Amino acid sequence: MIYLDNGATTFPKPQNVTRTTLSALKYYSANAGRGGHRLAMKAAEIVYNARSNIASFFGMDDPSRVVFTLNCTTALNTVIKGIVKSGDHILISEYEHNAVLRPIEKLTRSGISYSVVPVYEGDNDRTLNSFRENIKQNTKLLVCTCASNVFGIRLPVERICALCHQYGIITCVDAAQGAGLIPFDLSDSSIDYLCIAGHKGLYGPMGTGAMLINTDILPDSLTEGGTGSNSAQYNQPEIIPDRFESGTCNFPGIAGLSAGIDFVRNRGALNIYKNEIRHIQNLYELLSGDNRVILYTDYPDMDHYAPVLSFNIKGFDSEAVSEILSSRYDIATRAGLHCAPLAHKAKNTLEIGTVRVVPSAFTTQNDINRLVSAVKNIK
């Protein structure tokens, strides 16, 4: 199979990720932080080392401020639902995933309001001004994707967050589509919360994510329960990460995620980014020569795009194209609305969706050529 659905989850996983995950299951699969015996202590050590590895990768000094979550969605929900109160206002972009839109939409029943801010593709200054114009006196929180999971359009999140800090607004970045590609250094950043998916550009197993806390303003906990600490207390512990990590952690997944970060570190995130964006640029050029193919963005350069490309074929439903690519050519793509209706509304594809292509560190030029050949053969 030619796998080009890496925006959903990367596949294949690096060998060191598979090996580390299986090793954790086979040799150390005790409950980390829940016992004093040898296996539990070893598991706790592995989890701590993974926390430290993530902190270092994103420029953080304090590993305790890396909170493990089930996925990026859980991390985003923790920030959104734990920060705002009735009467507060939230800023989001027009390219947000449902992981942002749906929890915020639900909060409108509790007196929360939000604004969807227009983004100007390729014009960061105009986009920044667009966010400035939508700030209100009661704006409490900004939640912004670093890159659209549908069209790859990057937002100037560091500048947007710096702007919001001038107005005392708490900032949260959804890095599901950028972590492992786009560099983040939280030691010198206005990003208060960075929410990451472990199973995409960081090449970890599914069921892994993290909320990185870069502020002293803490949200309420999303869930409460056993933490292995202060067990005689009825109330949830206030210390972090325990405050946010109730229940048994995904120990094998966390071990695998740390191995995924090692893979990215060894290859070089910038090298991976350059290689993937080159594949997307080649695909863009080859598809743009077919007058049946509809492309939705300008030429994808590194400064303004993540390595994601959406297209359609005139006269075909996106789902039908993706099914043909899979059944006839064994090429895996993603079709439909990609859990991001705001993005499709912005590009007028809400009715038909798009076929999405996302490469990985393992994608080759031959993979791209075979995709283009298959698209041309669809009649």
Image (tube, rainbow, N blue to C red):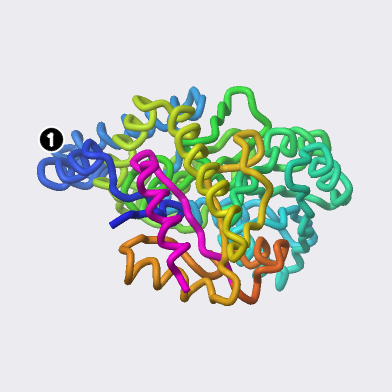
Relative side of 281 to 36, left or right? right
Q: Relative to the observer, which residue lies in front, 84 or 272?
A: 272
Relative side of 377 to 85, left or right? left
Whether residue 260 is situated above or below residue 322 in the rendered picture: above
Residue drawn 51% across the image and 51% down it: 75
User: How many other residues sit within 10 Å of disc 1, few (<14), some (14-19) or many (≥20)?
Assistant: few
Task: Please state the horizontal and vertical placement of residue 226, each as a whole percent of the image.
Answer: 35, 53
Q: Give amino acid for label 1.
A: Arg
Residue drawn 79% across the image and 59% down it: 115
Relative side of 9 to 220, left or right? left
User: Which range of residues does the magenta coloring cover?
Assistant: 353-379
| In the image, residue 363 lies in the stretch drawn in magenta | yes
| In the image, residue 248 lies in the stretch drawn in magenta | no
Residue 155 in view (yes/no): yes
Whether residue 108 is situated above or below residue 275 in the rendered picture: below
Task: Please state the horizontal and vertical placement of residue 249, each as a whole percent of the image.
Answer: 32, 50
Residue 113 in which image quadrant: bottom right
Relative side of 31 to 235, left or right? left
Task: Please state the horizontal and vertical placement of residue 341, each as a whole percent of the image.
Answer: 63, 67
Residue drawn 84% across the image and 52% down it: 138
Q: Relative to the observer, which residue lies in front, 75 or 110?
A: 75
Residue 35 in which image quadrant: top left
From the image, tell me which residue sits under label 1: 38
Q: Under tag 1, what secondary structure?
A: helix
Number of numbered labels in the structure image: 1
Q: Relative to the observer, which residue lies in front, 272 or 368?
A: 368
Task: Please state the horizontal and vertical placement of residue 240, each as a whole percent of the image.
Answer: 47, 39
Q: Relative to the observer, which residue lies in front, 21 or 316?
A: 316
Residue 232 in view (yes/no): no
Residue drawn 49% across the image and 32% down it: 274
Give the position of the N terminus as an image quadrant.
bottom left
